[in-house]
Amino acid sequence: MTVTKSFVDNLKDNASFCEYVDKLYGGGVDYQAARYKKIYDLHVATYDGDVSFYSSPGRIELCGNHTDHNNGKVLCASITVDTVACVTPLEGKVVVASIGYPEVVVDLDELEPSSEEYGSSEALVRGVLAYYKQNGYKIGGFAATTSSDVFKGAGVSSSASFEVLICEILNKMYNDGVVDKITKAKAAHYAESIYFGKPCGLLDQSAIALGGVSYIDFKSTTSPKVKTMDWNFADTSIVLINTGGDHCDLTSQYADIRSEMEWVAGMFHVRKLRKVKEEDFLAAVPELQKQVSGRAILRAMHYFEENKRVEAGVKAVKSGNFKKFAAVINGSGQSSYELLQNCYPLGDTVQRIPLALALSKLNKDVKACRVHGGGFAGTIIAFVDNAGADAYIADMKKVFGDDCVYRIGVRNEGTCKVEMN
């Protein structure tokens, strides 16, 4: 249906919208109704024509820290914060007005990558359009006004949320919804790695496109193995703590993890560690240390161990065994700290992530915690007994700030058009 002003003015009384709010956010209809109305009013003040809404979540990485870029395994989930867009068809170009950010304009006839656009939203939009066109999908113009609750620089993939949002708008508006979820993830990944200039794996985009809790095996990046499962730990709160760092200037340190793992793989005449047997790697360590750095060897050790932890995590989630799941998460966190070495940037003496982890481990209600996402700066994730979650959150807010501690939920719906009637 075409969304109208009278419809938007009464969203919180609309049964269809309330159902979507429960499905996407787990509640909060008054807040979401006001949020959707705000972007609608801003949008229609500039653009005429049919109006529709789209929603694209953030994501958490449950387990599988820095494995995807070497064809590894991950356990991830989409979450109950999102980027929302109010959208209208437009001729010849894509225009995105995101609240709090400069307007993005991309001409449909200018789709070549440019190093001058690295790190920009224009690059992400242009990259998605180029991928669709190169792979036989239709593209077309649109205007979008967006609002995002996906906190930037905190490891829940604000950029991937935006990328997959663009993918879904093109999918529904110009391709009759035929573009499958993994293809949307690939298009978003292409935009970020080739056009945006950030080397990354496919984890973030896949988790956001798929929705729910997902096990993804990236042995084949063209046809990754995907399994979805229910999250049955209702007595546990998931808390994210943005410790105050920012990812924006750390691209080279993220890239070093991937390049060092691939450095080790190259000693076995392959490009990715997935093609190396762990026993062969361990047997070769005496010779490897003469050819690669010790840090590269440690990061490769993390890779092999982390893949096994992902498999154990899947079994724990499927069986509803939280004790085993917590052991997997704590093991992953320790490995990221000691082997992967991504809990603080080189030369950093502030060390906000280590502080957050140390304080969390002192709390009896925290059953598991680890660095979250890319690491180096930003976020940790903690799994806390519901009974003690409010107290834990209050304590962490005293250290990291009221706006830096978030209780989030798992969202079963990936990026989608919000169909209301």
Image (cartoon, rainbow, N blue to C red):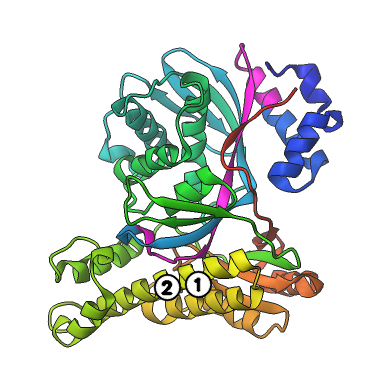
Is residue 95 shown above or below 254?
above
Q: Secondary structure at mark 1?
A: helix
Q: Position of residue 148 (x, y in %)?
A: 61, 42
Mark number, residue 312: 1
Is residue 255 shown above or below 335?
above
Question: How far apart in space, not on screen, are marks 2 and 1 (Cα)?
Answer: 6 Å
Is residue 42 shown above or below 220?
above
Q: Position of residue 157 (x, y in %)?
A: 50, 51
Marks 2 & 1, CB-CB < 8 Å contact: yes
Q: Position of residue 87 (x, y in %)?
A: 58, 23
Given residues 230 and 186, the one toward you in this image is 230
Please give the residue where the numbered disc 2 appears in the rendered image.
308
Q: Is residue 315 magenta?
A: no
Given residues 290 and 63, the one toward you in this image is 63
350 on left or right of 396: left
Looking at the rendering, the stretch of residues picked out in magenta corresponds to 40-68
- The amino acid pointed to by label 2 is Lys
- The amino acid pointed to by label 1 is Ala
Quadrant containing the N terminus in the rendered view: top right
